[in-house]
Amino acid sequence: MKQKSVGRVETYKFAIDEDLKLSSGKTLSNVELAYETYGELNSEKTNAILVCHALTGDAHAAGWHAGDVKPGWWEMVIGPGKALDTDKYFVICSNVLGGCKGSTGPASINPETGREYALDFPIITIEDMVHAQKKLIDSFGIEKLLAVVGGSMGGMQALQWTVTYPDMMKKASIIATTARSSPQQIAFNEVGRQSIISDPNWNGGEYYDKEKSPEAGLAVARMIGHITYLSDESMYIKFGRDLQDKDELSYDFTLDFQVESYLHHQGESFVKRFDANTYLYITKAVDYFDLSINGSLVDGLKDVKTKFQIISVDSDWLYPSDQSKDLLTALQTNDVEVTYSEVKSNYGHDAFLLENGQMNFLLSNFLHENIVDDLMETSVPTIDINTKIKDVAICMINSEVTHLPVVDDNNVLLGIVTAWDLSKSIAEDKNELKEIMTKGVRFCKASDSIEYIARQMKKFNISCLPVVDDDFKLEGTITTDQISHLISNY
Amino acid sequence: MKQKSVGRVETYKFAIDEDLKLSSGKTLSNVELAYETYGELNSEKTNAILVCHALTGDAHAAGWHAGDVKPGWWEMVIGPGKALDTDKYFVICSNVLGGCKGSTGPASINPETGREYALDFPIITIEDMVHAQKKLIDSFGIEKLLAVVGGSMGGMQALQWTVTYPDMMKKASIIATTARSSPQQIAFNEVGRQSIISDPNWNGGEYYDKEKSPEAGLAVARMIGHITYLSDESMYIKFGRDLQDKDELSYDFTLDFQVESYLHHQGESFVKRFDANTYLYITKAVDYFDLSINGSLVDGLKDVKTKFQIISVDSDWLYPSDQSKDLLTALQTNDVEVTYSEVKSNYGHDAFLLENGQMNFLLSNFLHENIVDDLMETSVPTIDINTKIKDVAICMINSEVTHLPVVDDNNVLLGIVTAWDLSKSIAEDKNELKEIMTKGVRFCKASDSIEYIARQMKKFNISCLPVVDDDFKLEGTITTDQISHLISNY
């Protein structure tokens, strides 16, 4: 499978031309979303996939900006030949409402005051983020997304999409997340917020025109977050108790261990690219996220219509598999089509950004519905209705097939003759092809899903189906042999 | 079982009269340790148990100080009739070196400057804490502790004792801890330290004479710690997603959820009772803790001689059971006597402070070696060597026993006669007691351990043993029936 990048990309801006009504009851005007797209939207506008980003992500999910030293955050699965195959799909990713990477958030200018919103920015929810994204999707004229995909907070958005706009997508892939934030998740977020708010440089959120911003508080918040994204085991593998740039313990308060140095680096680099107030707003949105109704997820998800994929990570202790299984059970109770997979990984929560093989395998299997067209044999020998039986047999032997479609002069399918039919001709002294061939045969279309066709062939005990177009002209054949090869690729 | 408190207690001070040489190579003078004791040291000084406290604990492990609203931190297991039974044992607990509850630490006055040490206090290790405790134990004239017991950082100290002073204790109970801090544990500690150090009021550690201390940073550090002490499940049970003093989400940055309010309360009350610099020093000591030698725990523990009990908690994700099992394996590899138990609890790491029943059961079973004296029957019928066979039979029937000790006028044991012997007398026409009784019988002492005696009785297929004093006078008997009743109590 080729693994290429979408290459050079740019971030665009989309201005929402109406006021956005928020969950809090407030409204927000002049909202802009930063977004990127990869691949081409097809003429039917049926191949669009919305990717939703996690807490500190952005619209730059794949490819390279000018001067980039590393590609977008989910380059691993987005690009030609990857699970989110940009040769087939049109992938859209936008920075969330409340973000600080180009979308309207607390660091944006409040049109009413001409100054940054800071804490005048209204509290936003995951549903508000999704409402804004919907406007962006509408702007492309897309009536139904092929899929919404997201991990962590991105998974919350994807899940919210299926509840708020149940007819807007065929599929949803919900990765390493929960349908409602747990008290432990809230607790970690609150400690992060408290760390920022305790920093005197936060100054009640009014630091945009000051010399100093609450970098120390934000760095600690990021360090806490980072610990929760890794598993205990991955930290052992990555750092153990190895010392940083020294052979012996320092016996002072400098950094002794590599893991300390790593965390400091994570904290320091984060404050350069992230706004502290956005951290407050977005973690609050995560805390508020709860799709249950009176505690019942079954009730909260009773109107979803989407085909679901749920993925969790066995070593993820921040969003443990049990929370994904709660979601799975609620969907199954509602008779929703859903598959669940647990990624085996040492990486912890971050596995959805790192487990290349498993993530590509699971996502591509879910997104790519193989159709007959992908597998059918088009250069199949056919025979004329007037062919003599002996010549039919010669053709069969020479072409090494057991099924020969019988067509008229316009290639319209009349029937099929098989090795079995030829045997019958000998047994019953039949000399005419039309006497022994099977008429009114089962057939399929090139656009039929392989899954469906495979079930039909099993049901009727058929090993070869002719593929016809709308005028019943033969386009090829599909055999159980070909389908089995597909399975063996996995 | 009666469950009483040791009642009113006081904290005492012990001054170490020599310089303490530290792991770092530095020395510390004028070291004082705050300590408490419960129960009475016996005249042989063989009943002392040292209890070691966790990160933020102190010497006040049990009982009540004047004005206390709650008792010492391990009241649950220390007291008359409890696992650390103060009717039997002499329990000692001291505040660690580097602490802020009466022992010498960074908030103490540096005799060289007349001011608080602050960051001039040397970095200390778990081994340094143990060295200081050893001086305290020596001051009582105790040559061998009955046991060293501790959970979390207290477990590290207990473990260090078994390595540093392998002949100084009969038993060690190592609870909810590890033999070496993991990178995840180091990471959480470093974030806590960073939170304190980032607080401008920390001021390089020089805040003792300032109006403000780094309360905000210390509170965040405590909040982080507190999350790690609880399990995800216990937080669900305790808080769920319940709101605090409100019916609806606030849509602002006030505290919405009970879990947030709880954490804030924990942070706020902690800063009133704890010194920020001590938090830095003690977490550093925890990070440095590593009993392995070149990565090998087997090597690091090769000289220990103690009988070990290891206890972990199934829901403890900060000190997960796997770390206790690593310790178990290393001890077993070294052929050390060790038992391992996993407490079943939702409480997470804090279970060792909360699981009353399981902790008392496990600790008392481990600490309390039942001896013959606890179970023996003292009012047993005996017979004189000159008793006629017929009278022996009558005595046996009337007293409903199958074993009768035979004694002389001074109650010195001469032998035993059994129902079996009487049968023999009939079969062999013997008429003298001295002809049929068993002489040179096996016997035991009242101070023998039940475990040992039970093994002996099994080995020699004996159902009743006479108990004699040093002059071989009969004190009573012990039977397999009595021993089996003991087992059935558990």
Image (cartoon, coloured by chain):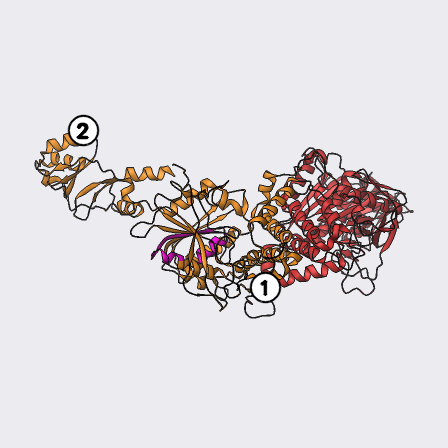
Chain colours: A orange, B red
Quadrant the C terminus of chain A occupies: top left
Direction from residue B396 to residue A66 in the image, left or right: left
* Number of residues whose C-alpha sits closer than 10 Å to that of mark 2, classed few (under 14), some (14–19) or many (20 or more): few
In this rendering, does residue A313 appear at all? yes
* Number of residues whose C-alpha sits closer than 10 Å to that of mark 1, classed few (under 14), some (14–19) or many (20 or more): few
When asked about the image quadrant of residue B422, the answer is: top right
**Residue position marked by numbered label 1 in the rendering:** B253
Which segment is the magenta one?
A136-160
Disc 1, SS: loop
Q: Is the Cβ of the residue at disc 2 closer than 8 Å to that at disc 1?
A: no
**Residue position marked by numbered label 2 in the rendering:** A398
Question: Magenta includes A147?
Answer: yes
Q: CA distance from mark 2 to mark 1?
A: 79 Å
Which of these two is toward me, B450 or A41? A41
Subunit of label 1: B
In this rendering, does residue B432 appear at all? no
Quadrant the N terminus of chain A occupies: top left
Residue A486, x across and y down, in percent? 33, 39
Subunit of label 2: A
Any mark on residue B63, and which? none
